[in-house]
Amino acid sequence: MHGERDLLTRFVMPEIRARAKKIFVNVYEVDLRWGVTEQDTRNNKTLDICLGEIKRCQYFLGLLGDRYGWVPDKNFILQSISKNDELGWILDYENDCASVTELEMYLAALKSPGSAQEKAFFYIRDNSFIKDIPKKYRKDFVSESNQASDQMKKLKDRIQSSGLETYDQYPCHWAGALNGVPLVGGLEQFGFRVLNNLWTAIEKHYPPEVTFMDDDSHITAQHEAYKQNMTDNFIGRSKVLRQCSNMIEKGESAVIVLTGKPGSGKSALMAKVIDYCQKDKTGGHIAPVFYHFLGAASGSSNISAILRRCILFLGQLTHEQLSVPQEYKNLVVKFHELLNSVSLSQQCPLVVCIDGLDLLESDTKFQDLMWLPDSLPKNVIFFVSAVENTKIFKALKQQKTCHFITVDSLDLTEKVDVVRCILGQHNKSLDESAFNNQMKLLVSKRQATNPLFLSMACEELRVFGQFEKVNEKLKSLPHTIPGIIQEVLARIESEHGNDLVSLALSLLVIVREGLHEEELHRLLSLTFDTGQSDISIYHLHQMALLPDRMLPQNKFITLLRSLKMFLRPTSSNSSLLVLCHYDVIQEGKQRYLKASVNCTELKLHWLLAGFFTGQLVETRSKRAYSELPYHLACCGAFDLLEDVVCDLEFLEMKFKHKLSHQLMDDFIAKGGEKKSFEKARQKYMDSSRLQQYRKFISQNIHILQQYPTLVLQQALNQPDSSLVYLEARMLLGDGKVLGHNAVIEWDNKPQHADPCQMTLTSFKEAVMCLAVLPDETQLAGGLTDTTIKLFDIQTGKMLSSFLGHSNSITDVCFVGQNRLCSASKDKTLCLWNLHEGHRISILKRHTRQVSSVCSNTSGDTLVSVGWDSTIHVWSGKDGKHQFEINDSRPINCVAFHIEGKFFVTGSWDSTLKIYDVYSMKRKAVLRGHTSSVRDVSYSPSGTHIASASMDGEVKIWSAQHGTQVGQLKGHSLPVNKLTFTLSGRELITVSDDQKIKVWSGDLGKTNHVFNTGPNVGASSTALSDVGGNRLLAVGCHNGDLHLYDANSGHLIWKNQLGDKRIGSLVFSPDGLYLFAGCSDGSIYWINHKNGPVDYVKLQDGPTGAVLSLACAGASPRILAAGSEDCCVYLYHLPTYKKQKVAFGKQVPEVIKKPSAILKQHEGAVTGCDFNLFDAIWDYKLVTCSRDKSVIIWSDVNDPKSAKVEKILHNCHNDWINDVSWSDTGNYIVTASNDFTLKVWDINKETCKTEIKGHEAAITSVCYRQGCIVSSDYSGLIKVWSHKGVETTTLRGHSGPVVGVDVLIQVDKVNKDENEEEEEIADWSVEVEKEEWQTEHKAKTINKQVVNVVDVLVASASEDGTARLWRPLEGNEITTLSGHSDCVVSAAAASTKNICTSSLDKTVKIWSPDLKSEPVIGQLDGPITALAIAPDGYSLLCGDREGNITLWLNIDGKWVYNHTHRQHEECVSAISFMDEGRFCSAGEDCEVKRTEIVYTGQGANLHSTMRLLEKKIVGSPVSCLSTIRSQCAFGTWQGLVYCWEIRTGKTGHLVSSREEDTDKNWVEDLVFQDDHSFVSCASNKIYLWKVTSAVYLTLQRQFCISGVSSIECFAEFLLEFLLVYSWLKHPSLVWCLKKTR
């Protein structure tokens, strides 16, 4: 029958398998004849194997020729029966001389033909072809003897008369011999008949509508089979069994936990208890029992799978039609609901049995037993088992409802009973006589108290064939389970060969979820076919296994039977092979997978990878997509793994097979963590292609999980430079569209990478709070549904879920590395153990909701605050209460200092309070907010505190001195949360405006960056501000001098003064002139308004390099120059007008020479400055030197009288590099190489303050309006208060900063102490004020308060750039958008993983690309107003921050020109009057008329904005319109204004009368002509008439009500025209309204 078997194997069965897979049926053929030799046939195991396999098969194909087959003799049959008593029926069979073939056909079909209908099929060959067979081969086709011929005829007659499907006399012909094997051909009709018979039967027995529903019943059957197997093996344990049954019989709700050591018999006892519960003991009712054995079926270790099965079971009890939820949390809720429902409807207790909780998947085992109700419903009993001292066991210990029953070791009687029972099943026993007590030899073994040991020992004795040597065998048996496993393996190796056994067991050890029989068979065959030689994965999956190359079924099935004791029991319809015990796996690894043995494990992973690659190509099976990446990672094939996971078709199939939870593990090569792979794996992880695909998946996983077919579409939506996009385009170009009918091309898609790395969407309620571990591995979130969830940040997988609160979670924080604390509206806190998944303690002291909780970095101390106005301090280890502090108002937030010494709170009373942790006393109160403080955070350095209040303000405070040092503006709605990154370099804020903003952790914003040229360092800088016209001068190492407009950043001119370094620059106080000092001693006097060439070089100047310059006065103008030659040179320079000479070379020579040379220093003069405080004529000069001294010179206005007034010696420990004189007091500040700054009181000649903070030599310093700015060689610029409080650090330069200058604009207000005091609103606040006043006795009378309006810092660096900074403004690095509702929380350890949560029920993980350089012209905030000039060449846009940006249309492209701060608040409207003038309105209640002044042309065209006039009204302005000389605008109060603009005069402003409006917001207005305009407010349209005679007047003409709300009049121009003509055609307006 070689030809028939070949046809079936090659063609028929592959076709059957392919068809069956489409209806989710797996077909496996068993051919016990192929590859079986005559010697094998006569082996005494053959009968047992053949007949045993027939019992396992659902269908039978019988093929008959003329040969009857081998007839076993009686002795052979008796030997077979002795080994398997189930074969006893053969002795009673009617034919004593039956062949094995007849016995097989009898057992399969002829024994009961009625039940075998449509399951057994027979095919009888036409023997007419035998005459054509050569004599050499004829013996293989004719009967063995006459007796055999008679027996065959009787068998055929019996088959034909049985009524079973029979194909009699199927045609064939002689086809010759192949490699000595005789074959027949012409079998097409035979093949088609087999195919039709078998497929018709399968379709009938497995209809599609059944197979789709069959998964649950299939899994249930596997659990039933496992339970039955365990029940059959249960022996003894009567005491423990009675204890369990008694607890269940009580019917009291409880959780019974069965625990013990591994292999102690917990599963068998569990099965016996289930069997006991299912019996009718009351005579009427049987308790409903749900049972689940972890490991009994594929996927049974997943907690969600367990809950789904239980929900379906409970649904049957309640007769409900259920829709089973998918998400874990919803499964838990549904489970609890059904438990309550069943408890009320059942008379007998419901028993829920779950065996092996310690086997729960690692990703889900620490759920804090969330699925287990805290309060069990009546009539509900949970019966679970877990190995003692495991983590899940410890978690169960924390449950108050748990009762523990320990399965102890077997006693002597139980051990004997176990042995008797197991051996008795096979009609064997041990001698127990006094003189040959074999039983004692066995039960006295060390681990004989363990049932697993005894079962393995008995199995080994059962197969031991030499009875006379049993005593020797018993004595030699190992004493431990590992030992006996090794002995059994050695025995199996001797029977089947070491290679085959080691390969089979090694494969079962290294796979994740077992192997199906067919898979193991093919893998064994594939290995032996390749000779175990090194072969590529590609060639492995390309190899076709021919039937004659397969491992013979006889050998394979015999091997499986030998390994049966190591495999989990399965149901009859399951072929999954899984090792049953942890010890078996460990011993298998120890025996076969040692690292020193030929890298066996690595080769096996290669084999599995090749096999699953073939499966992926051939069948596209779910297992292939699941297992292939894992085995590629395990064998270190990272290049192949990259090709697999970076394939769009593979990714789509992953999503279709519901395997998306594995994808992030695939990208991180889970399984490939071996040290030998470290470099290769890191290279794989660093691959640009992999990173792009990983980012693509993490960004889109929440979409693709629901819509897998969108993989290609989402790939095409990536930026054009992305590899994902390019490979998607290649697929389209090749015509491979992954089965899609169409895709959409997004033409104007963003071309930058999306900063959002991942979106977590599996939330039914909003996540209100977040916390991130410092190592960025885990993210915790608290939800409004009372749960806390723990996620892996890298993969997005939920690691744990904790349930213990009864109301919304308000805050969470990590307490050290292994604990988590949660705060809730239920007035409690919970402390959780993350590693073991249970609650450590419930913290109860608060009487209202707990609003916030934080931990110190060591996790030793917790601080919680609440709306009960109390602060509680707790132990972070066990939750014990330590201290309580009472406040006067509810508290919203709390944060710890990095060192744990202090914590700060934010309260409803708008204050921040700092407390000492050790003394528990309040140390400071910070005031400045005007509304409740929502959140607060310490910077990681501990130097600053950031706070956010209800009104949207974000303030930065000095943590040491409690003074406000800055404020962040950017969000349009209240800020809900703020947090620093661990480095302190970034601050993250989130707001109700749905935005996430990332700010520099230090205050200070880069306004402009100026490049001084390739390899040309900037060497000096100076600022000037005269009437708002701000200029920046930058000197360079190569002698270049650059002059910039400081407002717009445009280069005005550039000139080269020489080839020497410009070491110092200074503007004259009136801003008319610029002075430059060079390293060759040259000093240049420059009239910068006339361009770069209008300058004079001063003569007879320093002989050494000019290191510093200072200028004072206007008539005459005094210039001081400090030089490397240790001298100070003074020049007295009259103004141009007084000299009445041209500037340039016509200036008299005497003016070009120094008027005095001051010599007193002994070292180079590195700094000089004039006193500008109270100096009208009598100027003083301060100089500093490398001789560490500072000299004050007086009478410098008179060259002949200049003299030394004071000398301060040894002011620093190293060179003094710069000095600056305060413009508000008689103080100077010095900067030194010793890393310090010192503030000196000139009158007292003492050091007032020593300032430390720089970590490099300080190069430059400037002191203005009480503000000190300094720079150092490390590239940092620091801003200080005059008290030495660090305000901020400006970072951005990459080289030493060699020069700084500062401009400060202030408003001065006189404050009278006799001002009337405000009414006391809060006595607690007033008490604090009194405490402060008592401590600080100083009083002020008519003190002048200085309000800093604007600060501008310039810096020059050797990195080739100069920068302009706004040091007190927040530096908004980037804005992240993506949430669709208010963003309520944020957490981050670094900017690589910024985690945010929103009311849109999502959590997003961001990794923004933070650019250090500002993008000129980038609009970060919302655009609130737009206007285009009448000529179409200018565009103005206003933003929410009050800025107006000008864009110019140059050659058809809009080019950014500059940005100007126009209003203090949001710009609400802009309107051009003509090409150069416009009006703007803002929410700061101001309307401004501004002129744009252009200079230069072409590429050098730049502009400035000059304020012409402004009007202030009593309410924010909402809209504005202009026409020629008139400007009309509306306000929030409903008033409209008309402003007549008169050239050279102050314009006249008139407003509408209040009775003419309804006091609603004016939405928009527009001019019709010079005499009228239309406005819209509150569904009404108004027409206003403007008259202008001596005075401007404004009259309302009419009002139309009832119209739709209008926001933009441009859309309704037709209505305006009709309204304007209302007198002539009033009906048209109403007609239009009706039709619209």
Image (cartoon, helix red, strand yellow):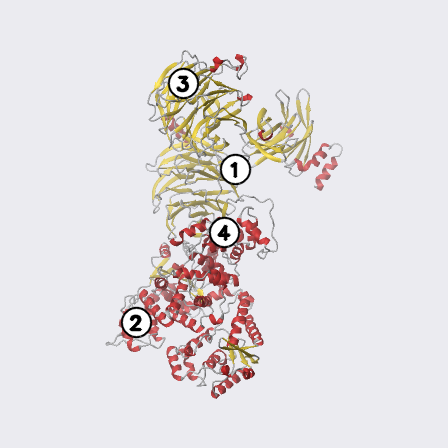
Q: Which amino acid does label 2 sit on?
A: Val
Of marks 1 and 3, which one's residue comes earlier in the chain? Answer: 1
Q: Which of 292 and 565 is in front in this view?
A: 565
Q: Name the side, left or right, on which 476 lies relative to 505.
A: left
Mark 4 and mark 3: Cα distance apart in space: 74 Å
Mark 2 crowdedness (10 Å alpha carbons): few <14, some 14-19, many ≥20: many
In the picture of the structure, the residue carrying the numbered disc 2 is 416
In the picture of the structure, the residue carrying the numbered disc 1 is 973
Q: Name the side, left or right, on which 695 lies relative to 735.
A: left
Q: Which amino acid does label 3 sit on?
A: Val
- Looking at the image, is mark 3 or mark 2 nearer the viewer? 3
Q: Where is residue 1168 in the image (x, y as percent from the top left)?
A: 41, 21
Residue found at x 39% / y 61%: 600
Mark 1 and mark 3: Cα distance apart in space: 56 Å
Q: In which quarter of the image is residue 1468?
A: top right
Mark 4 and mark 2: Cα distance apart in space: 54 Å
Mark 1 and mark 4: Cα distance apart in space: 27 Å
- Looking at the image, is mark 1 or mark 3 nearer the viewer? 3
Q: What residue type is labelled 1?
A: Leu
Residue 1449 drawn above or below residue 850 = above
Q: Is residue 379 shown to the viewer in this render?
A: no
Q: Name the side, left or right, on which 401 lies relative to 764.
A: left
Q: What element carries label 3?
A: strand
Q: Where is residue 1561 in the image (x, y as percent from the top left)?
A: 60, 33
In the picture of the structure, the residue carrying the numbered disc 4 is 762
Q: Are marks 4 and 3 in contact (CB under 8 Å)?
A: no
Residue 1226 drawn above or below residue 487 = above
Q: Do the residues labelled 1 and 4 touch (CB within 8 Å)?
A: no
Residue 656 drawn above or below residue 35 = above
